[in-house]
Image (cartoon, rainbow, N blue to C red):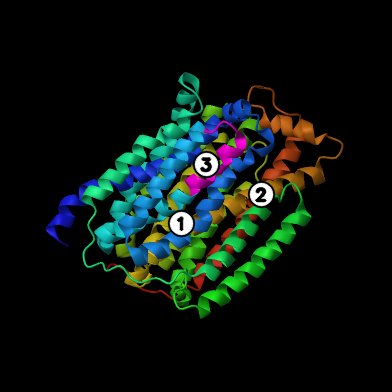
Amino acid sequence: MSNNKIAGRGLVMTAVFIATFMTSVEVTIVTTALPSIISALHGLAAQSWIMSAYLLTMAITTPIYGKLADSWGRRKIFQWGVVIFTLGSLLSGLAPKIELLIAARALQGIGAGAVMPLTFTIIADYYDFKERAKVLALNNTAWALSALIGPMIGGFLVDTLSWHWVFFVNVPLGILVFILIQVAYKKDNFTPQKLKIDIVGIAWLSVTLISLLMGVELLAKSLIYSLILFVIALIGLLLFIRTEKRVEDPIIAPKMFANRTFTIQIATTTILSGVLMGYEVYFPIWLQSLYRVNATNAGLVVTSSSVMWLIASFFVGTIMSHFIPKKVSLISVSILLISYIVLSFASLQFPIWLFYVIAMINGTCIGIVINMNLILAQHMAPPEMVGSASSIVTLGRSLGQTVMSGIYGTVLNIIINATRGTIPFSKINEIISSTKSTVKPDPQMAQVILNGLHGIYLSATIILIICWILNAFDPLKKIIDK
């Protein structure tokens, strides 16, 4: 590594930290402002698209940017993403109508699709295998910070200024990141490669992801339309795979997946990211609806998980230098399995403190394994494909969270409708949604809600079993330390 590169490394890592915070806080800070946004723009009917538009365009563009970064260079693509994200933030804050806000959010997602995976790639450029785990852990503090203070920042901005400022706050951060990267980023021995754009591959990838995410979005509203979209997504995926095997310069190189360990890392990241949503979303609902715990204390369940994720991240490098990754994954998933089996059969008298323990277990185990997945995926990919590998991991995390969120919501609705008897669904919805009443629901209604929650954690148990089986077939049987 050259002296110039070492000298600028601190500034580059500062930019990476700010960029990670900027894109991750976007979810938590906007969620807090949603009621004000919906009220001001009269957008209740389209409110779900405020989040979905961002996630959809980010998912579609993530693997494309990974390929472009490997071919054209990190700085150019990263800065492009920062500019688009910042412009999207500005336009979101200025949006006078809900339709324009959704369009601006889609633009933000296009920018985030470059920024999020390339933070990992830039870290891989600047640090060798032994140092990478520690630096990724430090960068995770930005993610943890966004989870901890994002809702507070959002609430403060909405209460003291207006909802517009939850978007405007990212504009100066984006400008600062752009300048730091422009001044400090150096990449030794990188020669831009001639890239033939895989237009057909991009088209089929877009069809696959749009159909999949739209199908998930409609799961709770129309099962038939969802199934049609899932079939289209499957057809799109098969045609995408066929295209990538034939083209000269594929957007996602099939040869990366020829390495079974690499494939298993991607699958594990996707599954565990889906499991993550099971407790992040539904632990607070369980505590608020059945135990009438206030929103602040219920939210501390998720906070405790974030803290443990952060702490666990600092030990990933040490763990990988002493233990075979496959064994670490199998032990971690086994621990998670036990906790979710317990939740699948928990009664209405299940102790509140155990939710905090299970959340901390989730944060620790998932934090270790997902960070390990990223490091191994980068390590297993050819050097010229590290950007693509990082983007695929990021795509897996996004898809896991989005798809499983839709599945969990559908499972909850189906079970509640099947077991509620003569209880009006609107009454159950009122109990789940209300955070003001301290009166617990009657035993029959509470049991119906509990049945739905059991279904969610049974679903998580099933995909954890799949995850365990996948890792059991991982051929990697040695410690990776360089």
Q: Which residue lies under the disc numbered 2?
A: 217
Secondary element type, mark 1: helix
Q: Quadrant of residue 256?
A: bottom left
User: Residue 223: where, in percent of width, then height?
Assistant: 76, 53
What is the magenta segment's predominant secondary structure?
helix
Q: Quadrant of the C terminus?
A: bottom left
User: Residue 355: where, in percent of width, then height?
Assistant: 55, 40
Question: Is residue 300 something that shows in the picture?
Answer: no
At label 3, counting other C-alpha atoms closer than 10 Å, the crowd grade (few under 14, some 14-19, many 20 or more) is many
Q: Which residue lies under the disc numbered 3?
A: 104
Examine the rendered structure and indicate whether residue 218 appears above or below residue 263.
above
Q: Is residue 173 magenta?
A: no
3 or 1: mark nearer the eye: 3
- The alpha-carbon separation of the residues under discs 1 and 2 comes to 20 Å
Amino acid tagged 1: Thr
Q: Residue at x 70, y 59 (%)?
A: 229
Task: Find the magenta span and give its range.
Answer: 95-109
Disc number placed over residue 198 in the picture, else none: none
- The alpha-carbon separation of the residues under discs 3 and 1 comes to 22 Å
Amino acid tagged 2: Glu
Disc number placed over residue 394 in the picture, else none: 1
